[in-house]
Image (cartoon, helix red, strand yellow):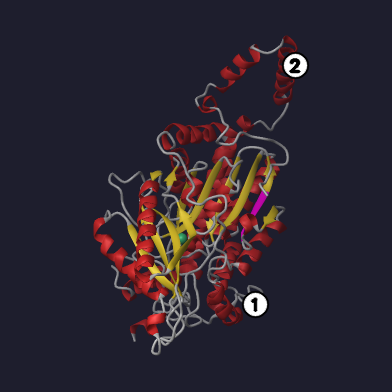
Amino acid sequence: MIPTPAQYTRPTPQNRSPDNHTGQSSGSQLRSTAAVTPDIQLSVIVTLLMMMAYFAGSPVTAQSFSSKTGQLKSEVAEKVQQNHKQTSIMVDKVFSFAELGFHEKETSAYLSSILEEHGFDVEYGISGVETAWLARWGSGEPVIALGSDIDGIPKASQKPGVPWHDPIVEGAPGHGEGHNSGVPLNITAALAVKEVMERENIPGTLILWPGVAEEQLGTKAYYTRDGYFDDVDITIFTHVSSNLSVTWGDAPGTGLISVEYTFEGEAAHSGGSPWRGRSALDAVMLMETGWNYRREHIHPLTRSHSIVTEGGDQPNVVPSRASIWYFFRDITYEGIMDLYETANRTAEGAALMTDTEVSSRILGSAWPRHFNKVVAETMYNNIETVGLPEWSEDDQALARAVQASVGSSQNGLATKLSDLGSPPSSPISGGSDDIGDVSWKVPTVTLRYPSNIPGLPGHHWSNAVSMATPIAHKGVTAGAQVAAMTIIDFLTNPELVEQAWDYYHDVQTAEVTYTPMISEEDKPATHLNTQIMEEYRPLLEPYYFDETRYDSYLEQLGITYPALEQAER
Ligand SMILES: [Zn+2]
């Protein structure tokens, strides 16, 4: 299942010699050839002479492209701008699918079909996940991977362009995180770069992949474990934000392990013979009570939260089975594993108190993120060139209305670029993203692009409001320009790839070793969200965006952009 490049082999991060990244690679290779037999030495010299002759007459050495970097970057930025309409259609289409993690069937099929149409080879069902895929085009080095998430948020259904809570389908999932926009951005960038690569005969391989079930931290550690990043040189991950930005070093926020504990007891008639029952629900409640007492004595940078996933069937039957699902977050891997072990003991204590049996399953995991300085600095130059989109009065009016609706400062959309983000001087807690696992495997950054409105709560209907409007469309185009230009930088300047790996080896992994939280046996939790999607998919289908009949999703829904007047009622 591990993808193998068709035409070449390159060192994986594990077997790269450190010398390869200290500028001594040719020296060390020459030293090693000096020790072998004269015949081999001769053949090496002949091969070198042949290579020199070949490259002298060839237009396709990577070095020869560096003089054209600037011109090619302007060109891809222009192509992205020309594709603005097609990009907007992709953004709107995925918004309308509104699928939860592991069930992004329409989204996955739609986006991968676009890549197939453009000549990408798509491997489906990677890591045993039906909606996951890996699309590959090109040949040779560098191998540049582009990823972004595609899943939605439960109960976040929301009409775009409407600044108060107005679901498309009451109770249905929606894009209250903005994950409808990232893969459309990546596709737009990749297609622009591919056109230039084909014309100029630039070597390199582009890989695109969707972050399935990011809200469950559900797949990226599996992709990493299963070898899908083994031949990757650089990963550009993209994530919606309210500014155009990139950071390097340890990112603010946490990693986590997501665990479900299931208790098994004994049923009995709750009124007739309760003494014969052993309540699994009691165990769940005692575990949660124990954890909440414990909370005072764990570091405030940790975060943990739970939901009860099974609590019995009805009051007059002593629950024989009950489950509680936790996220345990901390800013270091060691801290996360400490929390996990503490929780395991708490679960055993609850089982002991109730004479029940406990088992657990890892449902997701995410390492704390660390982003590559060289990639981030290269990207930030392009961010400064592209700048923030020009927002219209309507865009700003919608943003201020949404901000008013959720009680935030009414500052509107960002008009000043973020600085290049460096590691926080003291650690900051917060959310997690399983791109963390990828970031410890290969040089990685997250490009954040301005398709959303500042000051919103996150994972909320209000975060969906802008996501199928001109705000999202412009933000994605700006992000795609930055991504495409950054890919050109790495394709045409091989020394940048080397420098990125130098940082990875000499700084990032000098004192930290990546240890996956999942084992070889763990499997993605693909059962999650099944019932919710069975209930809501048929109700959402009539609202799928039909780009053959409507200019935009706003038009299809009959929304005049922006819908402000009713907000003032
Ligand atoms: Zn996200």
In whole angstroms, how far apart are the C-alphas of marks 1 and 2? Answer: 65 Å
The three-letter amino acid code for the residue at tag 1 is Arg
Seen from the viewer's position, the closer of residues 119 and 156 is 156
* Mark 2 crowd level (few <14, some 14–19, many ≥20, 10 Å Cα): few
Name the residue carrying label 2.
43
Name the residue carrying label 1.
549
Left or right of 340, for residue 134: right
For the question of whether residue 112 can be seen, the reply is yes
Left or right of 145, for residue 270: left
421 lies above or below 275:
above
Q: Quadrant of residue 388?
A: bottom left
Which residue is located at x 40 percent, y 86 percent? Answer: 273
Which residue is located at x 66 percent, y 65 percent? Answer: 109
Q: How many marks?
A: 2
44 lies above or below 20:
above
In which quadrant is the C terminus drawn?
bottom left
Q: Main secondary structure of the magenta part?
A: strand
Horizontal and vertical percent position of residue 507 = 41, 34
Seen from the viewer's position, the closer of residues 69 and 323 is 323
Seen from the viewer's position, the closer of residues 464 and 308 is 308
Q: Secondary structure at mark 2?
A: helix
Q: Is residue 485 magenta?
A: no
Horizontal and vertical percent position of residue 288 = 34, 68
Q: Nearer the viewer, mark 1 or mark 2?
A: 2
Mark 1 Cβ inside 8 Å of ligand 1: no
Which residue is located at x 59 percent, y 57 percent? Answer: 82
Q: Secondary structure at mark 1?
A: loop
Magenta-drawn segment:
132-136
* Mark 1 crowd level (few <14, some 14–19, many ≥20, 10 Å Cα): few
For the question of whether residue 469 can be seen, the reply is no
Left or right of 3, for residue 569: left
